[in-house]
Image (cartoon, rainbow, N blue to C red):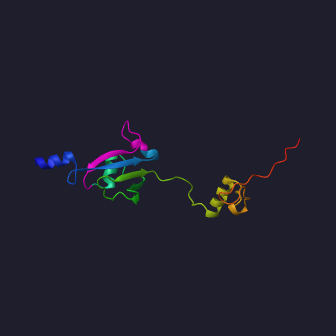
Amino acid sequence: MARAADDLRRGGEQGTIGVRVTLFADLRRFLPPGVDGPHSRTVPAGSTVAELLAAIGVPDDADITIGVDGELADRATPLREGADVMLLSPMEGGANPPNPTDTMRARADVRGPRAPSRAARQPVGGRRGERRSLPPTSNTP
């Protein structure tokens, strides 16, 4: 009995595990006081993401995107010692997905005219390692 209590206090496979939690966007309101950024949480061994969310205070019906160790996860995903958990709010936007053609056109408008390709540019110097001077400019008054 005393050994089980010691295991719980120390952590480990039968007691608790430590995970690193990063909250993004409006989920940052669930950060502990005085914490700004990724932080460590201790949960019982064998916990799932749902149990971690409950410990953090995130409501069961909250619409969130979950990542565990860089992979998309869900609330039923089991946690392991040292897991890196990221919680994000879903992105908001229009109801219909954008037309890819419109998106490409919008990007081109933002970037402005394209620079000439490398092949179309006039070389300033000679071959690699060779020094050439530029042609003189006419600065006659």
- The furthest residue to the left: 1
User: Which of the two residues, 121 or 131, is positioned nearer the viewer here?
Assistant: 131
- The furthest residue to the front: 130
User: Which of the two residues, 115 or 139, is positioned nearer the viewer here?
Assistant: 139
The reply to whether residue 137 is in sight is yes
User: Which of the two residues, 140 or 3, is positioned nearer the viewer here?
Assistant: 140
The reply to whether residue 61 is in sight is no
Q: Residue 35, position in %: x, y?
A: 38, 39
Question: What's the residue at 29%, 53% (across, down)?
Answer: 81
In this picture, is 127 found above or below 16?
A: below
Q: Residue 139, position in %: x, y?
A: 85, 44
Q: Residue 133, position in %: x, y?
A: 74, 52
**Number of disc labels:** 0
Question: What's the residue at 70%, 63% (across, down)?
Answer: 119
In this picture, is 25 found above or below 129?
A: above
Question: What's the residue at 64%, 60% (across, down)?
Answer: 104
Identify the magenta region: 28-46
Q: Is residue 14 left or right of residue 119?
A: left
User: Which of the two residues, 108 or 77, is positioned nearer the viewer here?
Assistant: 108
Q: Quadrant of residue 47?
A: bottom left
| 44 in magenta | yes
Question: What's the residue at 73%, 62% (across, down)?
Answer: 120
Quarter of the image for the C terminus: give it. Answer: top right
Q: Residue 50, position in %: x, y?
A: 33, 54
- The furthest residue to the right: 141
| 45 in magenta | yes
